[in-house]
Amino acid sequence: MKTLLVSANRSSVNMPVFPLGLACVAGSLRADGHEVEVLDLFEDRAPETSLAETIAAFGPQLIGLSVRN
C-alpha cells in the first residue's frame, strides 16, 4: 500500500524535535513491504503547497499525520 506519513509539527518551542514515532511507523511499514513516503513540514516555508505537490506526485492510498503534543 502506498502510504504518505506527514509530520505536521512546525513548532520549535523549547527545541526542534525529530519525528521519532513517525520514523518508527515508516520503518515498520517498509519492513512489511509497503511503499512509504515521509514528508516533514517542520522548516517548510509553504507547507500547504508541499503537501499538495507530494500527494499529487506520490498518489498515496493512505495518509497518516503526526503531531507534537
Image (tube, rainbow, N blue to C red):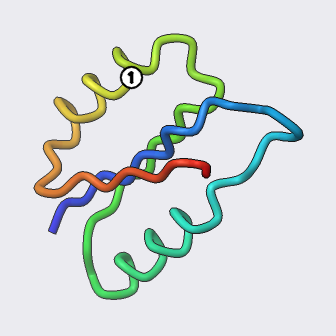
Q: Is residue 10 left or right of residue 18?
A: left
The residue most toward the right is 14
Mark 1: which amino acid? Ser
For the point 51% across and 48% down, the residue is 67
The residue most toward the bottom is 32
Q: Is residue 43 left or right of residue 5?
A: right
**58 vs 52: above or below:** below
For the point 31% across and 55% down, the residue is 64
* 68, 25: nearer the viewer: 68
For the point 45% across and 42% down, the residue is 39
Across and down, in percent, residue 20 comes to: 64, 65
Q: Is residue 19 left or right of residue 54?
A: right
* 58, 46: nearer the viewer: 46
Kindly state the secondary structure of the residue where label 1 is placed.
helix
Q: Residues within 10 Å of mark 1 (few under 14, many from 20)?
A: some
Residue 56 placement: quadrant: top left
Where is mark 1, residue-wise? 50
Q: How many marks?
A: 1
Across and down, in percent, residue 54 comes to: 30, 32
* 8, 29: nearer the viewer: 8
Across and down, in percent, residue 58 comes to: 22, 42
For the point 33% across and 28% down, the residue is 51
Across and down, in percent, residue 6 comes to: 41, 46
**2 vs 12: above or below:** below
The residue most toward the front is 69
Q: Quadrant of the N terminus?
A: bottom left
